[in-house]
Amino acid sequence: IGQLDLPLSGEGVRQAEALAKRLSQTGITAVFASDLVRSRQTAEMIAAHGGIAVSLRSDLREISLGEWEGCTFADIIRRFPDEFRARGADIAYYRVPGGESFADCILRVVAAFHDLLGKSTGDIAIVGHAGVNRLLLCHVLGLPLGNLFRIGQDYGCINIIQCSDAGFQLQLANSR
C-alpha cells in the first residue's frame, strides 16, 4: 500500500498485540517507527510494555508508490500495463511515476538505520514496513537490491540483526 496512511485492520491490531507481548521481556531500550499510522500504532503497543516513548521518523516510511498509491495489483496491471512490466523487469531501479524506486528508498532507509545505530545504545526496535525491512536486510546481508523480494516479510514478523564492530549478523528473519 506504499505510503497510503491507513490504520491497522482488526487483524493487524491482533498481530501487533501478539508482537508486543512477544517483545515485552526483551529489554528493548528504544523504539523507532515510521510516522505512518499503522507503524506508529504497532510501535506504541511495543513501547507501552517498557514505558518507552516512540520516536517517529518519516525516513522509515514505506516506498512511495506515486500514481500507484491506493491501487490494487489488478488496477495497476489494467491502468499501467507498460509501467507494470517495466517495473517487473527492473524492480530495483524502476521509479513509479510520482514515486520512488527501491534504489531511491534504500538511500533514505539505510541512512536512517545508521543514524539510529549511532544515536542508540542497547537493544532497539525499528517498526517499519515490509519493503523497508527487505531493504535493510539486503543492506546488512550484502545482497543485490534486485533480490529484495526473495526475502519473506510477513505482517507482524520479527527480524533480529546483531550489530558489532565486526559488522552485522542476521540472527532471526521473518519470525512469527
Image (cartoon, grey):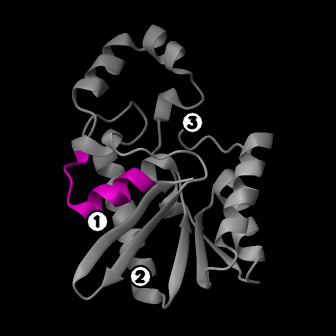
- Badge 1 is on which residue? 140
Disc 3 versus disc 1: nearer the observer: 1
Left of 95 or right of it: where is 127? right
Give the number of the disc on residue 1.
3
* Magenta stretch, main secondary structure class: helix
- Most extreme residue toward the right is 10
Residue 76: in magenta span: no
Q: Position of residue 95 (x, y in %)?
A: 32, 36
Say whether marks 1 and 2 touch (CB < 8 Å).
no
Tell me the element at label 1.
Answer: helix
Q: Position of residue 175 (x, y in %)?
A: 51, 55
Tell me the element at label 3.
Answer: loop
Q: Position of residue 125 (x, y in %)?
A: 55, 73
Q: Give the residues drawn in magenta, as a range.
A: 133-145
Tell me the element at label 2.
Answer: helix
The amino acid type found where label 1 is placed reads Val
Which residue is at 40% across, 61% downward? Answer: 109
Disc 1 versus disc 2: nearer the observer: 1
| First in sequence: mark 1 vs mark 2 | 2
Residue 161 drawn above or below residue 63: below
Within-10-Å neighbours for mark 1: few <14, some 14–19, many 20+:
some
Say whether marks 3 and 2 touch (CB < 8 Å).
no
The amino acid type found where label 2 is placed reads Leu
Residue 77 drawn above or below residue 172: above
